[in-house]
Image (cartoon, helix red, strand yellow):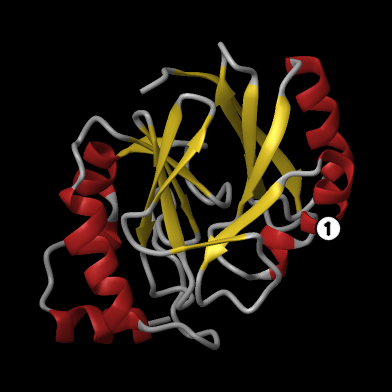
Amino acid sequence: MGRLVIFVQILVGGDGNFTYIFGDERTREAAVVDPGYGVEEVLTRARLLKVDVKYIFCTHSHADHTGGNSQLKKETGARVVMHTSAPLPKDIAVTDQDHVKVGNLVVRVIHTPGHTHDSICLLVDKKLFTGDTLFVGECGRTDLPGGSSKDMYYSLFSKILSLDDSIEVYPGHNYGERPSSTIEFERKTNHTLEKRTLEEFIQFMKEP
């Protein structure tokens, strides 16, 4: 597996949205995660990095994470990767534990429904792109269409918290005290990850 040595986090606007570029330094193949806004800036960064954007990964189907797909695909020829249940155009449909190669990097797909049914997290090297599933200090809301507190509970406690504490967390929005975190930091400090039964978590998510 190649080492993830090309990596950029871009604050692109909207509701504090983050877009990411990652890639394989040796092959110069790269991917963009969640191009909701600021496509021109993303393209500029890609040119400066001298990378070939091959894939567009979307962590879920909300417009603030997918709004730039068409333009970015037109400009780069990249293939759009989304969960199989996502109700938007995609070139590659993925599900839980699928793998996609970007150069020599292996992207592991983790299906994490809760915020939406089609939510996924992406594990690349030691970096986890969490979209709107997990933020720094919070988790995604579950009261929008397709959301489920029950699903979010299992996504957080059975999937994300099963990962190694050293994994770095890169969320879809700049909502926390810092732009990124680790599984260990979130486990210790994120109030949404406190030990609760499923019923307690569902009730917690209803609270304002």
Q: Quadrant of residue 188?
A: top left
In the rendered image, the vertical position of residue 105 relative to residue 198, given as above or below: above
Q: Residue at x 55, y 51 (%)?
A: 172
In the rendered image, the vertical position of residue 178 relative to residue 87, given as above or below: above
Q: Quadrant of residue 22?
A: top right
The picture places residue 193, in percent across and down from the top left corner, at 23, 60
- Using residue 176 as the reference point, say whether residue 201 is left or right of it: left
Q: Residue at x 12, y 64 (%)?
A: 195
Q: Residue at x 45, y 78 (%)?
A: 117
The picture places residue 39, in percent across and down from the top left corner, at 83, 44
Give the residue type at disc 1: Ser
- Using residue 171 as the reference point, say whether residue 196 is left or right of it: left
Give the position of the N terminus as an image quadrant: top left
Give the mark count: 1
Q: Nearer the viewer, residue 178 or 117?
A: 117
Q: Residue at x 41, y 19 (%)?
A: 2
Give the position of the C terminus as an image quadrant: bottom left
- Using residue 187 as the reference point, say whether residue 80 is left or right of it: right
Q: Nearer the viewer, residue 163 or 144?
A: 163
In the rendered image, the vertical position of residue 78 relative to residue 96, given as above or below: above
Question: Element under label 1?
Answer: helix
The picture places residue 12, in percent across and down from the top left corner, at 75, 44
Query: Which residue has dot 1 on it?
Result: 70
Q: Around disc 1, counting alpha carbons within 10 Å, would you say few (fewer than 14), some (14 to 19), or many (20 or more)? A: some
The picture places residue 192, in percent across and down from the top left corner, at 29, 63
